[in-house]
């Protein structure tokens, strides 16, 4: 699975951005899609997930401000980001997730090729 992120930019605190992720390749393997981000000098962290059944989940710092969605064919995933804060500054990545057995429990893990990401900078 190949992924191409877009939509980042420079925005003032309190502003909004909408990120897009174009998905191609073996999309039949995809059980869910997720957004991640990596700030300067930090490890990549998970931001949000949307399952094939359109169930969503968010990391606590973005809950209520960010919304993950997908188009009907499932080839594009979006991240609507509102009320942006300086601490949201990061490179944002998307990835495709597959279900696997983690000690007998179903879990999700990314399996796509990481793209270049899209830079989001929140600053005055």
Image (spheres, grey):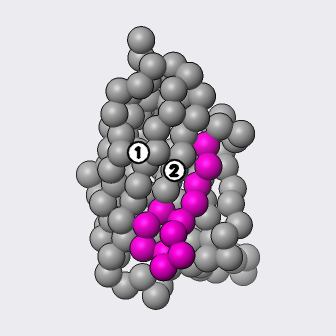
Helix, strand or loop status at disc 2? strand
Q: Residue at x 32, y 81 (%)?
A: 25
Q: Is residue 33 left or right of residue 6?
A: right
- 1, 18: nearer the viewer: 18
Residue 102 visible to an observer of this rendering: no
**Looking at the picture, does residue 76 appear above or below residue 47?**
below
Residue position for label 1: 92
Helix, strand or loop status at disc 1? strand
**Looking at the picture, does residue 25 appear above or below residue 48?**
below
- 75, 104: nearer the viewer: 75
Closer to the N terminus: mark 1 or mark 2? 2
Residue position for label 2: 79
**Looking at the picture, does residue 101 appear above or below residue 23?**
below
Q: Which mark is residue 84?
A: none
Q: Are marks 1 and 2 in contact (CB under 8 Å)?
A: yes
- 42, 86: nearer the viewer: 86
Location of residue 8 (image quadrant): top left
Magenta-tinted stretch:
66-77
Residue 67 visible to an observer of this rendering: yes
Q: Residue at x 51, y 26 (%)?
A: 15
Percent of width and height locating residue 39: 41, 33
Q: Is residue 69 magenta?
A: yes
Which quadrant is the C terminus positioned in?
top left
């Amino acid at each position: 699975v190949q992924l191409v992120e877009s939509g980042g930019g420079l925005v003032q605190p309190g502003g909004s951005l909408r990120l897009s992720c174009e998905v191609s390749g073996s999309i039949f393997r995809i059980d869910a899609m997720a957004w991640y981000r990596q700030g300067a000098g930090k490890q990549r962290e998970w931001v949000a997930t949307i399952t094939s059944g359109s169930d969503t989940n968010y990391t606590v710092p973005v809950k209520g401000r960010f919304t993950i969605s997908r188009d009907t064919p499932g080839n594009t995933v979006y991240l609507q980001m509102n009320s942006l804060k300086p601490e949201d500054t990061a490179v944002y990545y998307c990835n495709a997730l597959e279900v696997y057995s983690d000690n007998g429990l179903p879990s999700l893990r990314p399996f796509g090729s990481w793209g270049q990401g899209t830079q989001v900078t929140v600053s005055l």
